Image (cartoon, grey):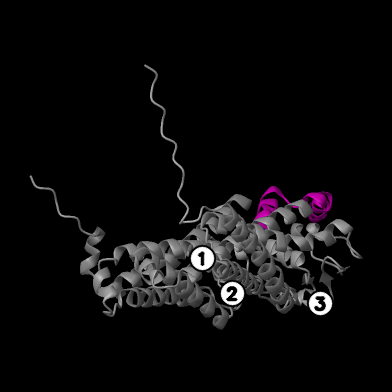
Amino acid sequence: MAPASPTTSFSSRHRPALLLGAAAGLVSALVPVLTCAGLALAGWYLSDAGGHGAAGDAMGVGAIAWLVGHGAGFTVGGASVTVLPLAVTLTLAWWTWRTGVRLGESVWAHGPDVHRIGDGERDWTVPQAVAGLVVGYLATLLVVLNLVSGPSYEPRLAPALTGALALSLLVGGPAVAVGSGRAAIWAAGLPPVARHAFAAARRILVWYVVASTAVFLLAMGLGISEAGFMVSQLGLSPSEAFQYALLNLAFLPNAVLFTGAFLLGPGFAAGTATVVSPSAVVLGPLPLLGLFAALPAPGVPATGWALTIAVPVVVAAWAAGRHQWERPTLRWDHGVLRACAGGLLAATALTVLMRLSGGSAGPGRMSQVAPFTSEVLLHGLVAFGFGALAGGLLMTWWQRRTSVPASEPIAVTEPSAPAP
């Protein structure tokens, strides 16, 4: 019996890319919202065995948490809370990316092949699939918004739609291009310096987040006694303590990015008329949230904290040098361009993330909890730019010094004849 000819799964090449994209958009939105609703339902039942409220209300709370991850926000004491719980948002972005990659794999056979694309033939496969993904995602969001809206919860429509559009278009779109193989075709047309600059920027950004996480954990370790005092003051039951821990975890990425703003120098505001930076710390009354235990004491920080402003430069130099080590070039101009451009791109991307990490965290003084993004951008461009430039130049110099010129023959030692 002859083996069956290979085909795409679910005969996807026979289905329109727009339809496949719409189905992927529904999956990308429905799976997380149902997961959030299920977790909220489990928490409701475990807290008091369902003694208060109804199961539908608990699932509605989970759906609201999903919407808050898109920027819908909520209201506390008549004040709007707009800070994104980035742990939720990043989880949604991860799932959207995975769904987009799978969608790309299902439509790779649509449209012209690589040779026809190379000849200049137009390819609408990715745009059609992404358009379906966006429509399916936004339609699901609007349905959920309509279901949970009421007197007790009025979501912010415009930010929620903007967040959903950003996830489905800016995260799902590149994922479809990667999964379908189109991203590799398009990237092949870019100059090598540009490709290396993007790779260096990604490495710098990843390692700076790792460094910021390490510094934040160190600060939390120094303030662990204060965090324990906060928890004791609240008098939480075991189920409430679990929910309190989840609340802190939801904003953990925000705290890491705030730490990154601190390391760059400008710092951040933990309330109106406050500043937390290596040069000065001015604070006021704060909510009993465990993450705030990592804040330095008011006044002038210790010398050790002031020295942390060298971290961005060192990280950028090391990451750019490491990238240069793995992808060497002997040309000074290439070493300069891709290292420096990588540092500038990393600083820009980091500023965008920090802009998303802040906002209003409650009424009164807590209406401003955010990094000073304009100053962060300026400091990041200088620190990452010069750090990456130094690392790239140093590694280029080392590789030029230790490389063998192409015109110089390499001596090969002939094996000696065995003794008779």
Q: Is 272 placed above or below 196 here?
A: below
Mark 2 or mark 1, earlier in chain: 2
Say if residue 381 shows up in the picture: yes
Indicate the quadrant containing the C terminus: top left, top right, bottom left or bottom right. top left
At 56% across and 78% down in the image, what residue appears?
A: 150
Q: Type of residue at label 1?
A: His
Of helix, strand and loop, which mostly describes the magenta segment?
helix
Residue 408 at what x, y percent from top left? 48, 53
Q: Type of residue at label 2?
A: Gly
- The reply to whether callout 1 and callout 3 are in contact (CB within 8 Å) is no
Q: Is 320 placed above or below 270 here?
A: above
Q: Which residue is mark 2?
A: 71
Q: Secondary structure at mark 2?
A: loop
Q: Secondary structure at mark 3?
A: loop
Quadrant in the picture for residue 89: bottom right
Residue at the right extreme of this rendering: 299
Q: Which residue is mark 1?
A: 196
Dot 1: few (<14), some (14–19), or many (≥20) neighbours within 10 Å?
many
Q: Secondary structure at mark 1?
A: helix
Q: Which mark is residue 272?
A: 3
